[in-house]
Every structure is written in structure tokens, then in C-alpha cells.
Image (cartoon, rainbow, N blue to C red):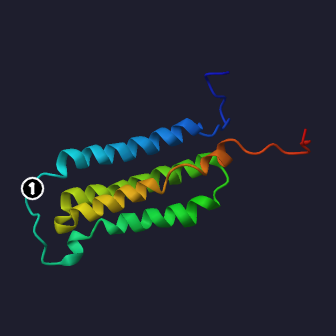
Amino acid sequence: MRLLRLPGERRPPPLKAWWLLWAASLAGLCVIWWNFGFLKLLGNEPHANPFYDLAGLVPLFVSIVLRWLVLPRYTEAQRAFVVFVLGLALAEACGLLGIFLGGPYRDDLFLLGALGLAQFAPLYARRLCEPKPQGFIPNN
């Protein structure tokens, strides 16, 4: 196994990187919630504009579109990994905005952010990183 890549040589990110990044993002959001979620933060009362408290839904909606409409169309693991990381960041942004700016919707936005991260579980990444062999394969 070579440690250095040749110029122009492209290797997909290993499957372990997909799972580690996903688990670290989900665990990180839960740790932040555990540390700050039970505190009474200033400005926890409802804002005059109700859309201000629900600002975390915008990145969540974009991450859902990335996961279910954009990511399945990629066949190269390198390009899909970029969309995967972007979707994780947007789903985590929903949880973070909910924790710190959610007002009365703090718990709801955190839970939606955690579920947004959970939908990115890289179960689909195996077909990108380890494609099926081509040609005739006997059933012995």
C-alpha cells in the first residue's frame, strides 16, 4: 500500500471516514445539548417575529433536499463525500441554532437537528466506496 498519491490519481474517501464524521457530528451536537440545553439562556421568551425563533428550519430543509434529492444522484464517492459533509453541517446548524437562538422551540429544533443528522447515516456509502465487481461471477 502506497502512502503517497501520484498527481492526478483519485481515491475515494474510505468508508470509515464517512462513519466517523457522521458519528462525531451527532455526538458533538448531543454533547453541546447536554452542556447548554438545560441552562436558562437569556432571550428564551418568544420573539415578536415568530419566524426568528424558527430560523433553524431553513438549513434543515436544505440538508433534507441534499440528502434525498441530490446525494443519490452521485456515482463518484469523492463528489458525494463533499455533499455529505455539507448536508451534515447544515443539519447540525439546525440543532445549534435551536439550542442558542430557538427561544421556546429549543427542544424541538435540537431534536429536528439530531434527526436531520441521523438521516445522513452513510448506509449508502458502501456502494460508492466498494462497487460491485463487473463481469461474470459464478454461484459456487
| Residue highlighted by disc 1 | 40
x and y percent of residue 134 in the render? Answer: 84, 45
Corner quadrant of residue 24:
top left
Residue 109 in view: yes
Left or right: 66 in relation to 55 = right
Q: Position of residue 21 (x, y in %)?
A: 45, 41
What type is the residue that disc 1 sits on?
Lys
Tag 1, which secondary structure? Answer: loop
Say left or right for 60 vs 49: right
Q: Residues within 10 Å of mark 1 (few under 14, many from 20)?
A: few
**Residue displayed at 66% across by 29% down:** 6
How many discs mark residues in the rendered view? 1
Residue 139 placement (x, y as % from top left)? 90, 42
Comparing 59 with 135, the one in front is 135
Q: Quadrant of residue 95?
A: bottom left
In-image side of 92 versus 2 (left or right): left
For the N terminus, which image quadrant?
Answer: top right
Location of the C terminus (image quadrant) = top right
Q: Nearer the viewer, residue 52 or 25?
A: 25
Vertical arrangement, residue 70 with respect to residue 3, above or below: below
80 lies above or below 101: above
Inspect this view and state whether residue 94 appears. no
Residue drawn at the location 19% of the way across and 52% of the way down: 37
Q: What residue is drawn where x is 77% and y is 45%?
A: 132
Residue 45 in percent (x, y) is at 10, 68
Q: Residue furthest bottom?
A: 49
Tell me where residue 101 sits by quadrant: bottom left
- Residue at the extreme front of the image, as rendered: 140
